[in-house]
Amino acid sequence: MPKRKLKIDLTKNIKKLEITTRKLVGSGLVGSYKSAFKGRGLEFTNYRDYTQNDDASAIDWKASVRTGKLLIKQYEEERKIDVFFLIDVSSSMIFGSTDKLKNEYAAELAASLAFTILEAGDEVGFGLFSDKMNIISHPTSGKHQFFSLAKALSNPINYGGNYDLDNAIKHLLNFLPSGALLIIISDFIGLKGDWTHYLRTASGKFDIIAIKITDPRDIKLPAESYNIMLADPYSNKTVVIDPLYAKLEYEQYATEQKRLLEDSFMKMHIDILDLSTDKSFIQPLINFFMRRHRKWR
C-alpha cells in the first residue's frame, strides 16, 4: 500500500514566523539571536586611534594611558554559527491522533526554524535519521538550502524504519565542526544502547538543543471503555487493550519515561523543549529563545 502524501503546510507557518520575526526585531531577540546561544556576538580584534567622529564613551582609557594616545577597541562579528538539524524520521514519528502526524509537525517546525536562522545570516545543515542516516547536508547559507530541506522533508520515501540515535550522533561527531549548534528533533521513543554516552560526548563538542515532539496519545489514553489495537512502530507487533483499564499504568509509564529523559538531558546540560502536536509551536519557540537569551546574556 503506497504511503499517503504528507500534509506539510510550510507556507502558512513560514508566514506566521515571518510576522513574529518582524515583531521581535524591535525587542532585539531575532537580531541578537546569536547571543541566545552561549553569548556569541562581537569579538575584539585590535585598537585604533580615536577620531572626532567616534563616541567618546568608546575610548579605552587603560590602553590610552598606556600608549599616550586616545584609543578605542575594534570589534568584528564572530563567524557565522553552523546550525544542524538532526530530524527523526523513524516509524514512531508516523503517528498522529490530531490533525498533524508527528513527522508532519516536526517537518513544519524544522523548516520554519531553518528559514528564520538563514534569514539571520547563519548556516543550516540537516540530517534525516532512522536506524541509518537517510539524508545529510553540510551547513551552508542561502535560500537554496531551505528549499533542499523542504524538499527532503516533504518526500514520503524518506520516512520509516527503526530508531538509532547512537548511530546518528556517532556520524555527526566526525561530520560537524566543533562549536556547531545541534538541534535534535525527535519523539525520543525507542532509545536503546549507550545513547547517553554518545550524546554526552557530543555535548562536549556541540551546543545541543533537544526538541521533543509529543502526540497527546503518547502520554494519555482516552477515559473510555472499548477495544483498541496498539502496534509497536518498530516490530509491528500488536495488542488489543481497553484504554480505560490500561490508562493508569500507561500514563504512569509515560510520565516516568519523560522524567528520565529530562533528567538525562539536564545532567548533560542539554536544553529541552517539549512540543505537543495539538498546539502551535510558534509561541513555545519564542518563549524558549527568550529563556536562552536570559540564561546566556
Image: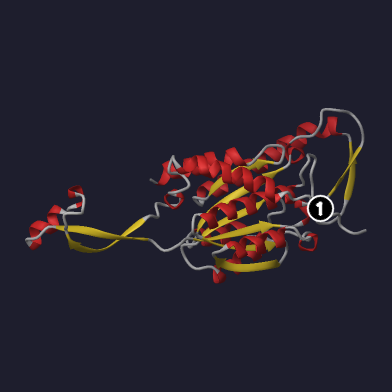
Q: Amino acid at mark 1?
A: Pro
Q: Position of residue 143 (x, y in %)?
A: 59, 62
Residue 287 relative to residue 280: left or right:
left
Given residues 83 and 9, the one toward you in this image is 9
Check the image and name the residue furthest to the front.
Answer: 53
Residue 34 visible? The answer is: yes
- Residue in the image at 80% along x and 63% along y: 157
Residue 93 relative to residue 211: left or right:
right
Q: Secondary structure at mark 1?
A: loop
Q: Which residue is mark 1?
A: 233
- Residue in the image at 69% along x and 53% along y: 107
Check the image and name the residue furthest to the left.
Answer: 68
Given residues 121 and 67, the one toward you in this image is 121
Q: Quadrant of residue 241?
A: top right
Specify the quadrant that holds the C terminus: top left
Residue count near mark 1 (Cα–Cα under 10 Å), binned few <14, some 14–19, many ≥20 = many
Q: Position of residue 152 (x, y in %)?
A: 71, 62
Given residues 30 and 198, the one toward you in this image is 30
